[in-house]
Image: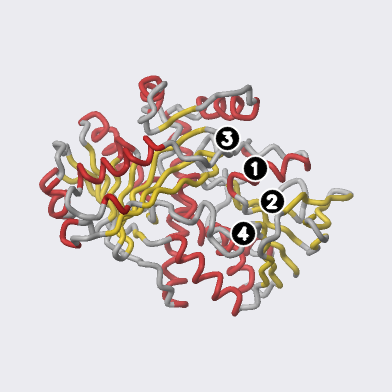
């Protein structure tokens, strides 16, 4: 079967790889000149099943009020115009902030994340990919006792679904990651997920794209997608500037840009772009930089060692598809590195970046079929695109191949909305 994958980020490339492995003739279309140049380029670097708790949860509501009007808040809304889609998304988000729905959405996300982590480990063994991988786990730290208590209860829930999260005292946190012993703030404690991993998503995407090409995948670079042509209930081609590219099936894996292409088909994907920032800092003293990937949960920032670089990433800015960077938001990330790891790197050589993450109101991805039988969705992974990429790609390849996926698909499709 001929399959076209729209999007060459980590999700699209993983999907193309698994489709080719299943014996399909695969073409990837992307507007960039090579793989991984948008959302996958400089993310936080975590393979973090431990972050399965959705954005929409009861604890976030009082925080949203506290964050309003603050440029240094972990979440900033820039409501500069009337945007019905964003307001509708916001209402759905609020309805998901109940304990019951938080539990349901956590399980759904964790189901995909755990499967994906296994797929990544298998793929790494098969292909020997080099992407600054570390399997030293993720340590989430807390300076606020209430947030630590909430996170400890959430960890207990995740443990029930197969994710081993260990609550640690402050001294135990320093044993897990000695570089934190220099931090300036008092530490309440932490939660350590030893089975989670880290690595450079961009390097991984590039390496897997090369392997996919050797496996027969064709790439159409520098090819902006204008529209999805449709007739009689089916997609019958991808409209580009110069031609119509046809196939038997099509996979929409364009992250936050997916709703733009889906809307003319009558498909309303409840996805909004959330701009995340990152800063990459050259490490000058390896002993003062973390080996374990660290999450500062209260500030929604992650700190990941990628070879001789330290990547700090996080926060969210709801400002549509605007990729311009607000200086205060990336500079506060540098200041937080100085507070946690004050002597680790060359802060004056830090490289800022911003990218868009595709957020659903329940924080679970949208995977599977659509009312168009030959159009498939692999989008809406939010802040866990790198975490879910391999598992989601394998799931879509199985579905297109007519196979039963390795995990249950309940609650992961567009039909839940």
Of tags 4 and 2, the one toward the viewer is: 4
Residue at the image point whose x is 40% and y is 20% from the top: 65
- Mark 3 sits on what residue? 320
Residue 387 x %, y %: 44, 55
Of tags 4 and 1, the one toward the viewer is: 4
Q: Quadrant of the C terminus?
A: top right
Whichever of labels 1 and 3 marks the residue nearer the N terminus, that label is 3
Numbered-mark total: 4
The residue tagged with tag 2: helix, strand or loop? strand
Image position of 210 (left or right of 126):
right
For residue 414, the mark is: 1
* Label 2 Cα neighbours within 10 Å, binned few <14 / some 14-19 / many ≥20: some
Residue placed farthest to the front in the image? 348
Residue 221 x %, y %: 66, 64
Of tags 3 and 2, the one toward the viewer is: 3
Residue 30 in which image quadrant = bottom right
Residue placed farthest to the right in the image? 232
Whichever of labels 4 and 1 marks the residue nearer the N terminus, that label is 4
The residue tagged with tag 4: helix, strand or loop? loop
For residue 369, the mark is: 2
């Amino acid at each position: 079967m001929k399959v076209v994958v729209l999007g060459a980020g980590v999700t699209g490339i993983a999907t193309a790889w698994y489709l080719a492995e299943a014996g399909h003739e695969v073409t990837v279309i992307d507007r960039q000149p090579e793989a991984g140049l948008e959302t996958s380029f400089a993310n936080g670097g975590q393979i973090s099943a431990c972050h399965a708790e959705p954005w929409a949860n009861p604890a976030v509501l009082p925080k949203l009020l506290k964050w309003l009007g603050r440029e240094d808040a972990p979440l900033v809304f820039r409501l500069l115009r009337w945007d019905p889609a964003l307001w509708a998304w916001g209402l759905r988000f609020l309805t998901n902030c109940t304990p019951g729905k938080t539990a349901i959405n956590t399980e759904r996300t964790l189901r995909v994340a755990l499967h994906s982590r296994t797929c990544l480990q298998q793929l790494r063994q098969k292909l020997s990919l080099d992407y600054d991988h570390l399997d030293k786990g993720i340590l989430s730290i807390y300076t606020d006792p209430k947030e630590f208590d909430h996170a400890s209860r959430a960890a207990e829930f995740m443990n029930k679904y197969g994710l081993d999260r260990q609550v640690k005292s402050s001294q135990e946190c320093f044993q897990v990651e000695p570089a934190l012993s220099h931090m300036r703030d008092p530490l309440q404690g932490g939660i350590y997920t030893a089975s989670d991993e880290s690595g450079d998503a961009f390097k991984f995407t590039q390496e897997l794209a090369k392997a996919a090409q050797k496996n027969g995948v064709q790439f159409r670079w520098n090819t902006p997608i204008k529209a999805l042509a449709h007739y009689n209930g089916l997609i019958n081609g991808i409209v580009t500037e110069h031609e119509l590219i046809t196939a038997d099936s099509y996979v929409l894996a364009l992250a936050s840009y997916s709703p733009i292409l889906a809307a003319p088909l009558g498909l309303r994907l409840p996805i909004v772009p959330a701009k995340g920032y990152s800063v990459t800092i050259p490490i000058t003293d390896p002993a003062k930089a973390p080996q374990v990937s660290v999450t500062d949960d209260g500030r929604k920032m992650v700190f990941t060692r990628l070879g001789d670089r330290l990547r700090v990433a996080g926060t969210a800015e709801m400002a549509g598809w605007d990729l311009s960077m607000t200086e205060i938001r990336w500079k506060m990330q540098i200041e937080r590195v100085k507070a946690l790891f004050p002597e680790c790197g060359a802060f004056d050589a830090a490289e800022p970046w911003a990218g868009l993450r595709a957020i659903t109101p329940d924080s679970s991805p949208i995977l599977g079929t659509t009312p168009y039988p030959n159009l498939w969705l692999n989008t809406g992974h939010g802040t866990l695109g790198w975490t879910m990429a391999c598992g989601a790609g394998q799931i879509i390849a199985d579905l297109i191949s007519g196979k039963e996926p390795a995990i249950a698909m309940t609650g992961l499709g567009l039909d839940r909305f």
